[in-house]
Image (cartoon, helix red, strand yellow):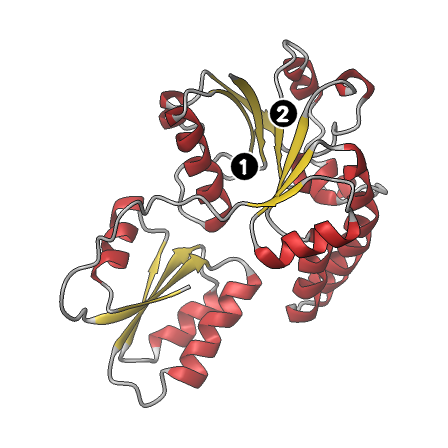
Amino acid sequence: MLLHLISFNIPYPANYGGVMDVFYKIKALHGQGVAVTLHAFQYGREAAPELEKYCSQVYYYNRPTSLFQQFSSLPFIVKTRDAKLLLQNLKKDNAPILFEGLHTCYFLNHADLKNRKKYIRMHNVEWQYYAHLAKMESNILKKIYFKIESKKLQVFEREIKNVNGLLAISKNDTEYFLEKYPHISTRFIPAFHPNEKVESQAGSGAYILFHGDLSVKDNEEAAFFLLEKIMQGVDYQLVIAGLNPSEKLKTKVEGLKNVSLKANVSNKEMNSLIKNAHVNIL
């Protein structure tokens, strides 16, 4: 079986939630004999030869993120993934297409793809997610951006009406799409991940681990909540590990004796941290 998979970013290294789901999904499909043609938008990450082990072909596309892209009725996360070369490559055969999130759906209803089987992996109810980001954000310009993007995403979501199926990552999202789009086949498929067996060590670990993409406002706020509301008076060490922590978070951690911050760790180091933690906080 052949399958086109369009990823919002390069899914390797698989070191945060979104790309982790994509990468381990590709591995699972490869293990089932599916020949995956991967289309990945490139920004902030290098091309990854590791992906060629599990994909029959890998294409990379530039994602322009200039402010000019904001002057569109389309959501920014969609408009910045409008690579014409992507459409040309999708037209090379008639294989089904899996779109990873609304982000990758610019060509979803293009006339040249009218007769193709199309599925969307829903990582969030995106307009709700961006509305939540707007509430959490203190920077006024970012807050305005998130509010506008939420409204655009709510409108753009209607474009999914003719897809063959939705693959929701959470039960709450599954219920939302089943209720709003009852004519679309929607299934709950939990996040793909590398943990096929229990590898935690016997006995007690020496620390509590919180890990995630720390550049995401939700995750940063969760880290601050742990520091300010949970760790006060707790003797255990807390390790916060993840991508691109802010200066604000770094400064907060510096003054705490029982907290350490590990930024941009490798997959190997992250797996070791998870394995040896006494408590993992997700």
Which element type, helix, strand or loop, lies under badge 1?
A: loop
User: Which is more N-terminal, label 1 or label 2?
Assistant: 1
In the depicted structure, whether residue 224 falls above or below residue 166: below
In the depicted structure, whether residue 218 falls above or below residue 85: below
Q: Mark 2 highlights which residue?
A: 97
Q: CA distance from mark 2 to mark 1?
A: 16 Å
Question: Between 242 and 281, which is closer to the camera in this rendering?
Answer: 281
Q: x and y percent of residue 246 in the render? A: 48, 63
Amino acid type, residue under disc 1 in the picture: Asn
Callout 2: SS: strand
Asked whether 259 or 185 is in front, the reply is: 185
Q: Position of residue 57 (x, y in %)?
A: 48, 16
For mark 1, does the 10 Å Cα neighbourhood hold few (<14), some (14 to 19), or many (20 or more) residues? Answer: many
Q: Quadrant of residue 211?
A: bottom left
**Quarter containing the C terminus:** bottom left
Residue 218: assigned label: none
Q: Nearer the viewer, residue 278 or 260?
A: 278
According to the picture, the residue beneath numbered tag 1 turns out to be 9
Q: For the point 69% across and 70% down, which residue is it?
A: 135
Give the residue drawn at x 54%, y 37%.
9
279 left or right of 55 in image: left
